[in-house]
Amino acid sequence: MSNKMLGLFGVIGGAALMSIEIRHNLLGTVLNGATIDSFDEVLYIIWSLGLMATFWGIYRLGVTGSKTWMRLVPFVAIIGFAAMAIGSIVDILGFSTASINPIFIVAWPLILIGTLLTAIFALISRTWAGWRKFAPLLVVLAIPLMLLMNQVIGEASTALVGLSWIFLGFAVSTSEPTFSLQTSQA
């Protein structure tokens, strides 16, 4: 599968997350475990699968560096997104609810830590040039920025987080590989 497709899946996933955020704003509900329903869970699955593809694209592109241990960093986020998808499936099947699902306790930190490490290594490795090298960092910064903006403009700022994931998917979809997987250094 091409990087364009992997990134496109991330754009779709980011749009799914953004639609959850917008939907809750339109309904006048605060997005939390108690207000998440099955429709949201399906969108979380789409988000998770889309971003798993995008982080696979980041790995394939070698965005986090050429050394093996640096290149493996995106898998932390991939495991987190896989756990998120599994947790959402568990909720849909009625075995748990989003407010008490223990799988999410594992998923969220892995997603956040994996994205933060990817952002740091993307900047350090300088594999991506221009605006792309800041795409993972934008995702990391979108969360505290959203929390600050919630104080000013209210819950409408939550859509920023979904938009940042769309931007990351777009960065992957418009990237060309800088080196082959077979020639990476250990």
Image (cartoon, rainbow, N blue to C red):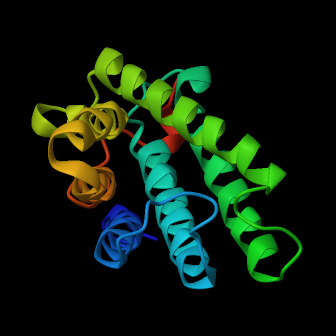
Asked whether residue 121 is in view, the answer is yes
As rendered, which of 174 and 169 lies closer to the eye?
A: 169
Q: Position of residue 122 (x, y in %)?
A: 35, 27
Q: At x 48% / y 58%, what residue is drawn?
A: 51
Residue 179 lies, with reference to residue 164, above or below; the image says above
As rendered, which of 101 and 139 lies closer to the eye?
A: 101
Q: At x 60% / y 33%, what residue is drawn?
A: 72
Residue sitting farthest toward the right: 95
Q: Position of residue 149 (x, y in %)?
A: 20, 39
Asked whether residue 186 is in view, the answer is no
Quarter where residue 45 is shown: bottom right
Residue sitting farthest toward the top: 124
Q: At x 81% / y 72%, what residue is drawn?
A: 90
Quarter where residue 18 is shown: bottom left
As rendered, which of 105 and 32 lies closer to the eye?
A: 32
Q: Position of residue 120 (x, y in %)?
A: 39, 20
Q: Is residue 78 left or right of residue 130?
A: right
Residue sitting farthest toward the front: 28
Q: At x 42% / y 37%, what residue is drawn?
A: 62
Quarter where residue 145 is shown: top left
Q: Looking at the figure, which quarter contains the C terminus?
A: top right
Q: Is residue 95 left or right of residue 65?
A: right
Q: Is residue 177 left or right of residue 73?
A: left
